[in-house]
């Protein structure tokens, strides 16, 4: 009894009063419209669902207020016509920090003229690339001369070279240096004459403008200036700074970030040739769906080459230079996905919308059909 009352009460709220079945007519056109609209609904539902599952990324540009003091530069560059012993890597920035001939996580690998790796073991940058004959018999209490470059003993060719560099002298006559002759330095240099060098690894730098460069000879400070010992480089015209950049990235390489210098190649046959790259670095932060953040950097690049060969009238340091500046802007890529409720709303809109439109079309066809029939009947009658 109560149940019936309740159901009667509810009936009053029915906004979808149904017509009696007897008055409904099923038509061929109505069936066609229904099938077509069902197909449309399925199609729209699938695309809505795909859109719901899809991860969207939105870039937002803001001023970079974070204070990231250090930045890692990852690199992998091959110099086909520069032997490792002659190639130095230096990093400097406007804060005044200099890392001459850096000894961090950068490795040099010797390459034969065909580009194959010679030594399986890569040497640290800064380490001696010319392995001395360390077993050479030295008299006890041996104290080699530093040839006036420094007080104390210089027992290996490398130590003499370092002493020379510290003093700002160029090391141009290894044949006259007893330590180098004993270690067969000249022969080793001769042996590596046609070799190339691959440099890979990373350096940590301050996040301020600066440059890093690959240049010939050992670098040192002289009267507050950064100079390279170019004597050995100029001895031969076989050397040049053709290079292949396999990859350069500021921060760990990321899938989303495109590094425009990756897999680029520059050729020259002139030994006194300088390549310059000017990079603008933009901090980039990626916020993933699960909330984890991955900071990195993107860059844009412009290039400039210059010929310093004798007779060109200009003088400069041959090599490959990367000058970089830090942009004050920060790009944040945020991954987003449609919420489930908005997906539901979308589905309802699709189903309701298509049915309504289909209803209008159906009734239009129905009335048109009826009118047409009437006309034909009238035509027959007359
Ligand atoms: C440097 O790049 C070359 C060429 O893509 C690759 O064969 C080599 O393994 C890379 N070196 C390192 C240390 O990733």
Image (cartoon, helix red, strand yellow):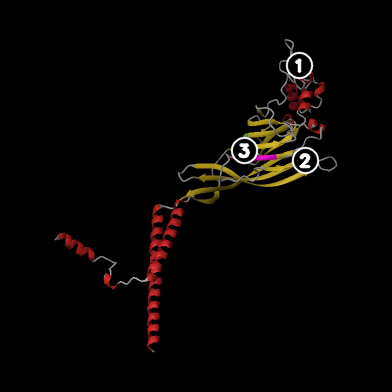
The correct choice, above or below, for 259 with respect to 180 in the image is below
Q: CA gap, disc 1 to disc 3?
A: 39 Å
Badge 1 or badge 2: first in the primary sequence: 1
Q: Position of residue 170 (x, y in %)?
A: 79, 28
Q: CA gap, disc 1 to disc 2?
A: 38 Å
Q: Residue extending furthest right?
A: 311
Which residue is located at x 29 percent, y 67 percent? 16
The numbered disc on residue 73 is 3
Check disc 1 and report the residue beneath it: 144
Q: Nearer the viewer, mark 1 or mark 3?
A: 3
Quadrant observed for ligand 1 in the rendered image: top right
Q: Position of residue 377 (x, y in %)?
A: 37, 84
Determine whether the residue tagged by mark 2 lies in a helix, strand or loop: strand
Q: Are marks 1 and 2 in contact (CB under 8 Å)?
A: no
Q: Magenta stretch: give its range.
A: 244-250
Check disc 2 and report the residue beneath it: 273
Residue 85 seen from this side: yes
Q: Are marks 3 and 2 in contact (CB under 8 Å)?
A: no
Badge 1 or badge 3: first in the primary sequence: 3
Determine whether the residue tagged by mark 1 lies in a helix, strand or loop: loop
The numbered disc on residue 281 is none
Q: Residue extending furthest front?
A: 380
Which residue is located at x 38 percent, y 70 percent? 28
Left/right placement of residue 143 relative to residue 328 reads right
Q: CA gap, disc 3 to disc 2?
A: 24 Å
């Amino acid at each position: 009894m109560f149940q019936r009352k309740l159901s009667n009460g509810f009936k009053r709220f029915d906004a979808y009063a149904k017509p009696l079945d007897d008055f409904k007519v099923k038509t061929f056109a109505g069936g066609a419209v229904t099938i077509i609209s069902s197909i449309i609904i399925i199609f729209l539902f699938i695309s809505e669902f795909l859109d719901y599952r899809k991860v969207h990324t939105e870039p937002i540009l803001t001023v970079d207020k974070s204070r990231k003091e250090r930045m890692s530069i990852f690199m992998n560059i091959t110099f086909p016509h520069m032997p490792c012993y002659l190639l130095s890597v230096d990093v400097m920035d406007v804060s005044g920090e200099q890392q001459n001939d850096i000894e961090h996580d950068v490795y040099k690998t010797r390459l034969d003229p065909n580009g194959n790796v010679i030594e399986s073991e890569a040497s640290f940058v800064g380490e001696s690339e010319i392995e001395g004959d360390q077993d050479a018999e030295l008299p006890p209490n041996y104290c080699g001369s530093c040839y006036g470059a420094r007080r104390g003993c210089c027992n290996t060719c490398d130590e003499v070279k370092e002493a020379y560099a510290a003093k700002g002298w160029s090391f141009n006559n290894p044949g006259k240096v007893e330590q180098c002759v004993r270690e067969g330095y000249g022969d080793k240099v001769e042996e590596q004459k046609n070799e190339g060098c691959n440099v890979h690894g990373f350096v940590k730098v301050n996040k301020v403008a600066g440059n890093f460069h690959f240049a010939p000879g050992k670098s040192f400070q002289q009267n507050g200036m950064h100079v390279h010992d170019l004597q050995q480089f100029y001895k031969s015209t076989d050397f040049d700074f053709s290079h292949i950049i396999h990859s350069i990235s500021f921060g760990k390489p990321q899938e989303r970030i495109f590094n425009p210098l990756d897999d680029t190649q520059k050729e020259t046959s002139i030994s006194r040739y300088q390549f310059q790259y000017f990079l603008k670095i933009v901090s980039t932060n990626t916020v993933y769906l699960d909330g984890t953040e991955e900071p990195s950097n993107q860059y844009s690049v412009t290039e400039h080459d210059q010929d310093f060969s004798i007779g060109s009238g200009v003088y400069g340091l041959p090599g490959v230079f990367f000058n970089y500046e830090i942009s004050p802007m920060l790009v944040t890529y945020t991954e987003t996905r449609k919420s489930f409720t908005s997906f539901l709303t979308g589905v309802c809109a699709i189903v309701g919308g298509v049915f309504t439109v289909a209803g209008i079309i159906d009734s239009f066809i129905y009335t048109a059909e009826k009118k047409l029939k009437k006309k034909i009947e009238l035509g027959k009658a007359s």
